[in-house]
Image (cartoon, grey):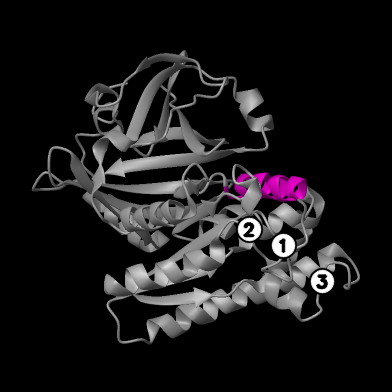
Amino acid sequence: MKITKIVITGGPCAGKSTAMSWIQNAFSQKGYTVLFVPETATEFISGGVCPWTCGTNEDYQKCQMELQLTKERLFQRAASTMPADKVLIVCDRGAMDNKAYMNDEEFAHVLDFLGLDEVRLRDDYDAVFHLVTAAKGAEQFYTTANNQARYETVEEAVNIDNKLLASWTGHPHLRIIDNTTDFSQKMRRLISEISTFLGAPMPCQEERRFLIEYPDVEALEKMPNCRRIEIIQTYLKSTGGDEIRVRQRGMGGSYIYYQTIKRKVSDTERVEIERRLSQDEYLEMLMEADTTRRPIRKTRYCLTCGIQSFVIDIYPFWKDQALAEVDLCAEDELCIPDCIKVIKEVTGDDNYSNYVLANRGW
């Protein structure tokens, strides 16, 4: 049995409610049992529990976060009892959404109250799909009429959308769905992104990689839309042409573990299958490490710029260069932020793949 938990997030009037219906129809037909965790803020505010009715915003956020996480745990427990091979749990907003409505001090107090840390809270979800508010690029469709808990102006909606995206930046599977197409196509793009994450073949050309100048790390760490992650990536023995790796990912002693299998199905398509591991499973799999390849250690900076998500990987064996990567849909126009100074594009050049870098005697 496979249970996958994803988040649908985004600014006010982004299309989340409609997206739930599209997801139900699309993935029920694909054989998934689809469960929806309803948005906690809407439930609370509709019931009279609001930041402005509680003692303080922090008091409200503690209540909302605790209820939200409890609901998610109960949905997962219920899913584990169901006679189904594949369960997709869809969270209408995730716990990190709450960070956008708090200052840093309030967020730290809430984490302490719940006994959590930011890395585990953010990365507990398998994937995050951010629907951009209609207030960005589709202003004529922005409205507060269809949600009694929504009160934001266009300017406030844009600001909240930016804060939400910054809150989730750093998640390994964050995808942004903007308003460059009409609304129906926006929903189709969302379904396509979820399908790809769940293992549908994806075009190889979507991923572009660049050799870049060594970045200004101090400047990156000051950016609100940038997050630092430490990664150790180990390749395992494999047969049949599959590329199998395990990864430790996190910061400050708080880590999440993954196994990834990359399988080529044609000259233009590949399947990437990923699953979360417990620490014990991760340590056990390390016993199957490919000893001809060294573990890759790198510091990753996850950066959102407009609708695109970049990663910058800094390796200990390079002092004057690094690698940057971005995933693009076919219709997307690449827009590289000023903080990335490209030396050359290395898309498709295996010499700069982690798999090959792990085989070099640095």
According to the picture, the residue beneath numbered tag 1 turns out to be 144
Q: Nearer the viewer, mark 1 or mark 3?
A: 1
According to the picture, the residue beneath numbered tag 3 turns out to be 50
> Which quarter of the image is occupied by the C terminus?
top left
Residue at the location (42% across, 67% down)? 22
Q: Which residues are magenta?
A: 154-168
Can residue 246 be seen? yes
Coordinates of residue 306 in the picture (x, y in percent): 57, 35
Q: Nearer the viewer, residue 327 or 274?
A: 327
> Which quarter of the image is occupied by the N terminus?
bottom left
* CA distance for labels 1 and 3: 17 Å
**78 shown above or below 6:** below
Q: Crowding near pointer 1: few (<14 within 10 Å), some, many (20+)? A: some
Drawn side of residue 30 relative to residue 184, left or right: left
Do the CB atoms of the residues marked 1 and 2 lie less than 8 Å apart? yes
Q: Amino acid at mark 1?
A: Thr
Residue at the location (71% across, 50% down)? 157
Q: Nearer the viewer, mark 2 or mark 3?
A: 2
According to the picture, the residue beneath numbered tag 2 turns out to be 13
Can residue 66 be seen? no
